[in-house]
Amino acid sequence: MTIKTILLAAAGCAIIAAPAQAATTGLAKGDVLVRLRGIMVAPNEKSGSVLPAFPGEKVKVDNSVMPEIDVTYMATDHVGFELIAATTKHSASGRSGTTGAIGRLASTWVLPPTLTVQYHFLPEGKVRPYVGAGVNYTLFYNEKASGALESAAGATSVHMSDSFGWAGQAGVDIDLNDKLFLNLDVKYIDIDTTARLTTTAAGVQRVKLALDPLVFGVGVGMKF
């Protein structure tokens, strides 16, 4: 999924939605919007070295696809507050050298609840673009070493530090009728963590990671 694909899909859906029935649509103060999206979380990781044993060796983090639910409360016709809740699973692998030869090093579940303040440009329209900015607190849980890492380094425990950062988003809601709408959304989430690997053979190793994923979402919503 790319930003170009999302924009083309939005244009196509706008054409389909244009002749929709003449019921009352749009947003107003007090409306509550509930969306169910399918999301792809694509980390843009910047990795430090695996230290102290493997200077110069860095890690990469894979993408993940999961469902997500969010709720927006419209404080005014234009301004809404959105709370996003989703959890995704990711794996970290070595890029080169000893860790690269091992391959997948560890996996973790990530829970980044995010609160954004949105500005909706055309609340009265059937096609309503918006932008938003806010904060997130990211929790890492159920971290596990891979079988390949434990075969190479012995029993290993994994811990990843939680993160607090900012978030930005842009999206569009497209009315299908007076209650249902299609949603396309892209977010950037600032996530920094330190992974600590405690191994039998190599002792304690640490690697700093700036994950900073883009989150691409497509789904449907309902206005209450």
Image (cartoon, grey):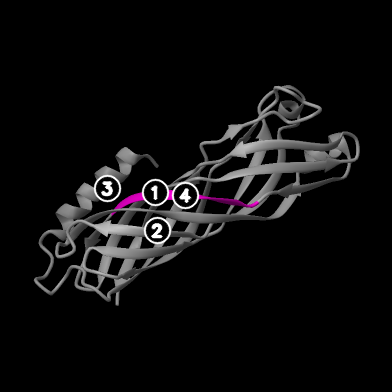
Q: Is the C-beta separation of discs 1 and 2 under 8 Å? A: yes
Q: Residues within 10 Å of mark 1 (few under 14, many from 20)?
A: many
Q: Amino acid at mark 2?
A: Thr
Q: Which label is found at residue 116? A: 2
The answer to whether marks 2 and 3 mark residues whose Cβ atoms lie closer than 8 Å is no
> How many angstroms separate mark 2 from mark 4 (CA)?
9 Å
Q: Is residue 212 magenta?
A: no
- Of 140 and 217, which appears nearest the observer? 140
Give the percent coordinates (x, y) of residue 200.
90, 40
Q: Quadrant of residue 179?
A: bottom left
Q: Are marks 4 and 1 in contact (CB under 8 Å)?
A: yes
**Disc 3 residue type?**
Ala
Q: Amino acid at mark 1?
A: Gly
Estimate the spatial distance between the alpha carbons at disc 3 and disc 1, rounded to whole Å.
Answer: 21 Å
In the rendered image, residue 79, in percent from the top left (x then y), is placed at: 27, 63
The residue that mark 4 highlights is 166
